[in-house]
Image (cartoon, grey):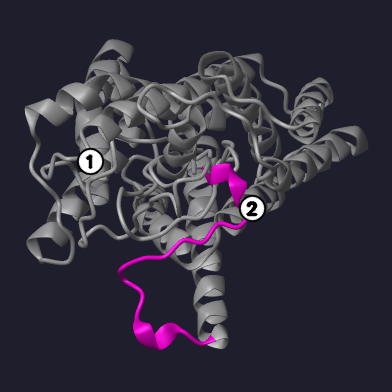
Amino acid sequence: MNDREDAFDGAHRRSLTVITPANDSNLSSSKDAVITSPIQHEGDSSDSQWLSSALTAEVLYCTVSAGTILFNKHALSTFHFPAPNTLLLFQFGMAVVLLQLLHLLGLINVEPLRWKSVRLWAPLNLIFVAMNVTAFFSLQLVGAGMFTILKNLSNVLTIGGDWYLYGLSYSWQVWFCLLLMTLSAFVGGATDLHFNLRGYAWQVANCFFTAAYSLYLSAVIKKASAQQHDKKQLNELSMVYYNNVLSLPPLILLILLSGELRTLQFYPHFHTLEFQVVAVLGGLMGFLVSFASIWCMSRTSATLYSLTGSLNKVLVAAVGMWLFKEPTNVTNLVSIIMGLGAGLLFVFAKTKPISAPISKSGETDQQVSQAAHLLETASTKPSGASGTPSRGMGKVHANSGSVVPQDSRYP
């Protein structure tokens, strides 16, 4: 859950979803957020058709994002797959192949790699790889219920980083929700019958990388906005392509250094059809999140999109605990419910207006951060649909700038 890219690619009509401030006022001045898309048809204007389309988009997004986590959890835990880096490499490689295939069929437009974009993208991509790798190692050892609750801690780090780095301020309701998230994580960890110190360490590291990705991506957005006049800037799916392609070399290096290839020689389920199906479906779900997030964002409001992400956590926790028969007790279960509830409240609390300083360019850091959040929630975390804060977005329209489809294995 969850990752913003170098976007604002002019008003490319081939982009699936794009954003721009509704007016010159602060984005947070409006409590409503409407997302539209060039792919919508004029005949879809009736309320019943819109509601049906929005509901379908939300269900699809929730299903594929939850399926990504559950299928990978199944592969890593149930089948005890000993090579998380290899599984991640396979899924990223599959995404690259599918994107190129759709491009060759003329269904999408994927632009070729350009050195200028690679240089801007590469440092951020290293954090992206670390974020996904730590999530895989954590998912292998931590139960699905506690995985979703511990993931909330990345919100605390991101909000703190927003305050320290960008001067953003939040309402007391936001801080109260973060306090509940932190409390639920500590109580849940203390009462976790499936507690694994190494798994928790991986998850804490994942929270730091998730927050770092979010915060650094805000800086990338500023650089990208300065290049807004560049007509050669990447479209959304090209950014997903970049993220996947640039992730391959670091993952190959990690595989060689960790000795996973030797481990795979003795893995008993490597040629088992059931394991292969689970691994492929996990990768396919992760790939489909990119498109499902675009569709969901184009058919719903920003608040509903974030709410869908929070409800997705409830689905992952409930189905995961039942499917993998995770042991629990009353206190642990209450802490999980409290954490999930805090996540739902957080969606509404964070939509309240927040204050931010005006930069020299005339944009508030808040505006940059808000735009960056859209890119994050549609580009990778997960998380988070991940739970990464939206920072009170205002109205969103299909005029200029772009939103990057979600690309993380953990929306």
Question: Vertically, is 353 above or below 48?
Answer: above
- Look at the image and give the residue range highlighted in magenta: 27-46
Name the mark on residue 93.
Answer: 1
- Residue nearest the observer in this picture, 246 or 180: 180
Q: Secondary structure at mark 2?
A: loop
Mark 1 nearby-residue class (10 Å; few <14, some 14–19, many ≥20): some
Measuring from the top left, give residue 347's x and y in whole percent: 68, 46
Q: Which mark is residue 297?
A: none
The reply to whether dot 1 and dot 2 touch (C-beta < 8 Å) is no
Q: Nearer the viewer, mark 1 or mark 2?
A: 2
Residue at the spot 34% in from the left edge and 22% down from the top edge: 263
Inspect this view and state whether residue 82 appears: no
Q: Is residue 271 magenta?
A: no
Residue 294, relative to residue 199: is it above or below?
below
SS majority, magenta: loop
Q: Amino acid at mark 1?
A: Gly
Q: How far across and down, in percent of the image, does residue 384 sit?
A: 53, 40
Q: Quadrant of residue 52?
A: bottom right
- Is 200 situated left or right of 186 in this image? left
User: What whole-number distance in Å separates the C-alpha atoms at marks 1 and 2?
Assistant: 40 Å
Q: Position of residue 302 (x, y in %)?
A: 55, 54
> Is residue 155 something that shows in the picture?
yes
Residue 388 location, quadrant:
top right
Q: Is residue 99 left or right of residue 74?
A: left
Write down the residue under mark 2: 31
Tell me residue 21's x, y (percent).
43, 49
Name the residue at the right extreme.
330
Q: Earlier in the sequence, mark 1 or mark 2?
A: 2
Q: Residues within 10 Å of mark 2 (few under 14, many from 20)?
A: some
